[in-house]
């Protein structure tokens, strides 16, 4: 049982669009190159199923990174990025910048919920049930602080393509990191966090897997 949490590549265009597949035009040219490079880096990684935020930038990243592998990409409502309030989303750029600057000048503990949009617990309440439902569809079920697997599903790997904020919520939940208004994890474009699971008496427990150090050059 393994989960790859992957941030989308550099975006272009409408950040909220949900175009039909195959998706194009939602990534900046640099983002296209990032997604294709991601695909090359994942070429040797077994992936059984892929889930994606419905937003075009996440779906296009997944489609480009997994091109030619025959992996179905399932769009999961609820895995979207932080959702701004209409007042913030529709404000003039100068007004929106001023609203954001006011929040940026506050203590983190004063920003659990502001006029800008979803608060920390709003995001968790949306993202976590969506993630649980997606993982249950492949036979993984959260139970009493751990995970149990349907017979035959233990060896599967799932890739989840989403956004910095929603990925923070997912990774915090999986690892049991307490909620906080400031994100605990930083995902670069096409950054991948690998969560592996080890079994104790039939219950699986997650751990963040860090990449190995590069091998030293031969003399």
Image: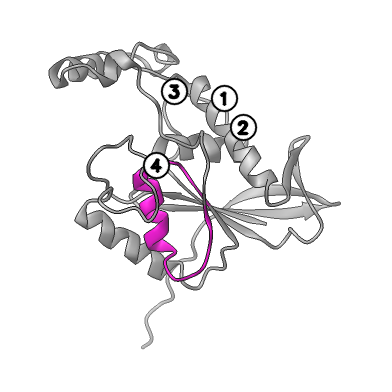
Residue that mark 2 sits on = 129
Q: Nearer the viewer, mark 3 or mark 1?
A: 1
Residue that mark 4 sits on = 186
Residue found farthest to the front: 20
Q: CA distance from mark 2 to mark 3?
A: 19 Å
Label 1 environment density (alpha carbons within 10 Å; few <14, some 14–19, many ≥20)? few
Residue that mark 1 sits on = 125
Residue that mark 3 sits on = 181
State the residue at coordinates (23%, 45%): 12
Q: Nearer the viewer, mark 2 or mark 3?
A: 2
Q: Are marks 2 and 1 in contact (CB under 8 Å)?
A: yes
Among the two numbered marks 4 and 2 on one chain, the one whose residue lies closer to the N terminus = 2
Find out whether residue 38 is within the magenta segment: no
Left or right, residue 199 beside residue 65: right
- The vertical placement of 135 against 30, above or below, is above
Find out whether residue 53 is within the magenta segment: yes
Label 2 environment density (alpha carbons within 10 Å; few <14, some 14–19, many ≥20)? some
Which residues are drawn in magenta? 51-73
Report if residue 12 is visible in the image: yes
Left or right, residue 213 beside residue 86: right
Among the two numbered marks 2 and 3 on one chain, the one whose residue lies closer to the N terminus = 2
SS class of the residue under badge 1?
Answer: helix
């Amino acid at each position: 049982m393994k989960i790859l949490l992957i941030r989308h590549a550099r975006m272009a265009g409408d950040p909220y669009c949900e175009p039909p597949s195959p998706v194009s035009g939602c990534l900046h040219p640099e983002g296209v190159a990032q997604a294709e490079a991601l695909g090359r880096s994942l070429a040797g990684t077994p992936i059984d199923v892929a889930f994606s935020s419905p937003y075009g930038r996440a779906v296009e990243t997944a489609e480009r990174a997994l091109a030619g592998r025959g992996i179905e990409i399932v769009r999961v409502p609820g895995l979207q990025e932080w959702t701004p309030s209409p007042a913030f989303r529709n404000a003039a750029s100068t007004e929106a910048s001023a609203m954001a600057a006011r929040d940026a000048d506050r203590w983190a503990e004063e920003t659990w919920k502001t006029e800008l949009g979803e608060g920390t617990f709003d995001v968790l309440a949306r993202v976590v049930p969506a993630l649980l439902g997606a993982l249950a569809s492949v036979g993984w079920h959260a139970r009493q602080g751990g995970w149990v697997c349907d017979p035959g599903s233990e060896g599967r790997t799932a890739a989840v393509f989403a956004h910095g904020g929603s990925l923070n919520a997912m990774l915090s939940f999986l690892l049991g990191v307490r909620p906080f208004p400031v994100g605990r994890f930083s995902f670069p474009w096409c950054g991948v966090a690998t969560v592996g699971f080890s079994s104790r008496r039939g219950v699986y427990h997650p751990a963040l897997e860090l990449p190995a150090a590069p091998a030293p050059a031969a003399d």
